[in-house]
Image (cartoon, rainbow, N blue to C red):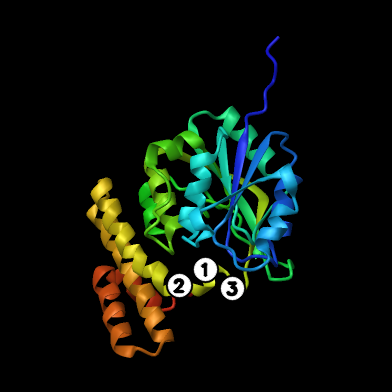
Amino acid sequence: MKQFSFPLVTVIIPCFNREKYIVETIQSVLVQTWPNIELIVVDDGCTDGSRKLMESFGSALTILDHPGRVNRGQSAAVNLGLVHCRGVYVAILDSDDLFKPEKITMQVNFLEQHPEIGLVYSNGLYINDAGEELFLRYGAGHHPPKDSSQVLLDCCFNVPSNALVRRSLYEQIGYLDETLRAAQDHDLGIRLAEVAAIEYLDECLWCYRRHDGSISNTTAKLRWQNGFKILTAACKRYPYPAKIRRKRRAVLHFRMGQCFLQEKQFVHAAYHLAMAGLLDPQRALGVLMGNEKAGSPN
């Protein structure tokens, strides 16, 4: 009779000055129902009390840091964890977010039953600074992306925090781009979608914390600037249709225009908004007519 095994899952938490949240984040991994987890926490040059809080967990986790304990950014911190991880599957968790207890179990079981799928992601719950529930990430009827063009156009799944990925995929595509201090998650999602089938579990298995210090709230302009670099690299790497490339460039110009409007730099804003309209006039007209919500660049 074949003995059932529990594949090792590595969870990587990159941490820079998150003493307010890191304990709760770590605990959300330690209470997972999956019995075989390797937890790696990367100290990305913390200068607050985060390191002592990590050390208080003893042998329950492995702490890594860069030479000299310098801060090198989230991508470099995650990559350090990937270099040292041993798991068949890899989950990455931001140091202020949370996993629901059954997250790893449900995603491992799915991937074990579907070897043709490279990664699986789930629905999640947005929470505020105090941990109070705000709203679900995805509404009813959400479907996973059909191809990498859809991911390029719209970061339609929150890789990596809500995903479980086969480690073999990282070995195939490489790790996170350390030159990007923002939008590195979108870049990773695009590259994964270029080589792997993606599936979605309509279960709330992850909590994303929104607060003033979160990366997504502090790097909006840089994220859209990096979007142009990501688009250029993607088009060199993969044969995206001209229409897809044009539409994505239009989105990037539109978001940059919004950022400059917030900064009251109206000349720069006008240039980017005009470029967005020229590249995708149909969508621009939809926004002007109120048929499509513009959303926020943050």
Which residue is tagged 2? 220
> What element does badge 3 sit on?
loop
| Rendered residue at 26%/62% (across/down) | 246
Q: Are marks 2 and 3 in contact (CB under 8 Å)?
A: no
Vertical order, 57 against 256 (above or below): above
Distance from disc 3 to disc 1, alpha carbons, whole Å, reads 8 Å
- Looking at numbered disc 2 in the image, what kind of residue is underneath it? Ala
| Rendered residue at 41%/67% (across/down) | 223
| Rendered residue at 61%/66% (across/down) | 17
Which residue is tagged 1? 216
**Residue 268 at least partly seen:** yes
Q: Is residue 163 left or right of residue 183?
A: right
- Looking at numbered disc 3 in the image, what kind of residue is underneath it? Gly
Closest to the observer, 73 or 175: 73
Q: Are marks 2 and 1 in contact (CB under 8 Å)?
A: yes
Q: How many marks?
A: 3
The mark lying in front, picked from 3 and 1, is: 3
Counting from the top left corner in percent of width and height, residue 76 is at 46, 54
Q: Which mark is residue 205?
A: none
